[in-house]
Amino acid sequence: EVELCSDGSAVNTGPKGVINDWRRFKQLETEQRQEQRREMERLIKKLSMTCRSHLEEETHKQKQKELQEKINGKVAW
């Protein structure tokens, strides 16, 4: 059986049409799931906290101190 849609295209309403509709539905479902997964990964990366170990924190503080001393040395008249 062939049925015409309002836009003039033909739609197969028989078994082949049902199978094609099911395949298209599953394809769209898979694409939607993949997009949700990508969005979730972006959100996780955005919201994930970064932390430093105690050693990394101490190293960072030391570098900041050295940088501040260099700035102060260049600014001092």
Image (cartoon, rainbow, N blue to C red):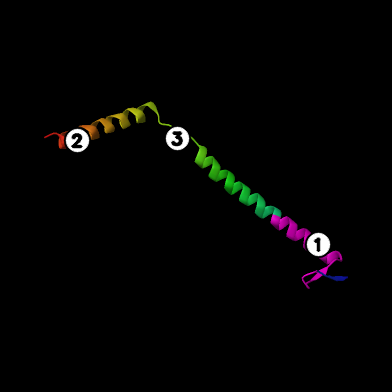
User: Which disc number belongs to residue 27?
Assistant: none
Q: Secondary structure at mark 3?
A: loop
Task: Give the residue at mark 2.
Answer: 70
Instruction: Answer with left or right where residue 75 lies relative to residue 65.
Output: left
Instruction: Indicate whether 4 appears above or below 57.
Output: below
Image quarter hosting the N terminus: bottom right
Q: Secondary structure at mark 1?
A: helix
- What is the x, y in percent for residue 43? 55, 42
Instruction: Indicate whether 70 appears above or below 11.
Output: above
Image quarter hosting the C terminus: top left
- What is the x, y in percent for residue 49? 48, 34
Region rendered in magenta: 6-28
Which residue is painted at 16% across and 34% down in the image? Answer: 73
Which residue is painted at 14% across and 34% down in the image? Answer: 76
The tag earlier along the polypeptide, 3 or 2, is 3
Q: How far separated are the C-alphas under marks 1 and 3?
A: 48 Å
Instruction: Answer with left or right where residue 34 lies relative to residue 20.
Output: left
Closer-to-camera residue (73/45): 73
Task: Give the residue at mark 1.
Answer: 19
Q: Amino acid at mark 1?
A: Ile
Q: Residues within 10 Å of mark 2 (few under 14, many from 20)?
A: few
Q: Amino acid at mark 3?
A: Thr
Residue 10, quarter of picture? bottom right
The tag earlier along the polypeptide, 2 or 1, is 1
User: Which disc number belongs to residue 50?
Assistant: 3
